[in-house]
Image (cartoon, grey):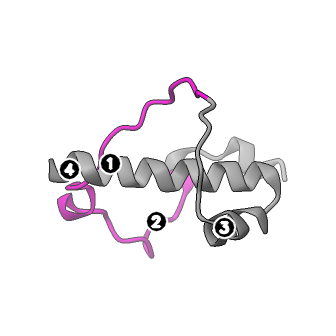
Amino acid sequence: MKKLPAMTDDDIDLSDIPELGEDFFKDAYVRLPGGRTIIPVEVDQDVAAWFMRLDRERAQEEARRAMREYVERQRQTG
């Protein structure tokens, strides 16, 4: 286990990993972390049930991710 911390980037074999071209990054954007706000929101019962099957922390993270993806798509389409 002492070998791994001593490795440099040049020691890593990347021969089986293809280079990522510009197509891979064409839709990429930077997401900066921001503050969070608690908002009351009503959701349909089936949607609430889906999120509530997860533990509380994961449910909140999944809901934030879903809302973030929706907002980003709306921004892209105008």
Please tell me whether mark 3 sits on a helix, a strand or a loop: helix
Which residue in the protein does label 3 denote?
45
Q: Is residue 27 magenta?
A: yes
Q: Main secondary structure of the magenta part?
A: loop
**Numbered badge on residue 14:** 2
Q: For mark 4, what is the residue?
A: 76
Return the residue nearer the eye: 4 or 37.
37
- Indicate whether 48 appears above or below 36: below
Above or below — where is 65 with respect to 35? below
Q: Secondary structure beneath disc 1?
A: helix
Residue position marked by numbered label 1 in the rendering: 72
Nearest the eye: 18 or 68: 68
Dot 2 lies on which element?
loop
How would you rate the neighbour count of disc 3 (Cα within 10 Å): few for under 14, some for 14-19, many for 20 or more? few
Q: Are the residues flagged by discs 4 and 1 in contact, CB closer than 8 Å?
A: yes
Earlier sequence position, callout 1 versus callout 2 = 2
Query: Residue 2, percent across and down?
Result: 83, 47
| Element type where label 4 sits in the image | helix
Residue in the image at 38% along x and 54% along y: 70
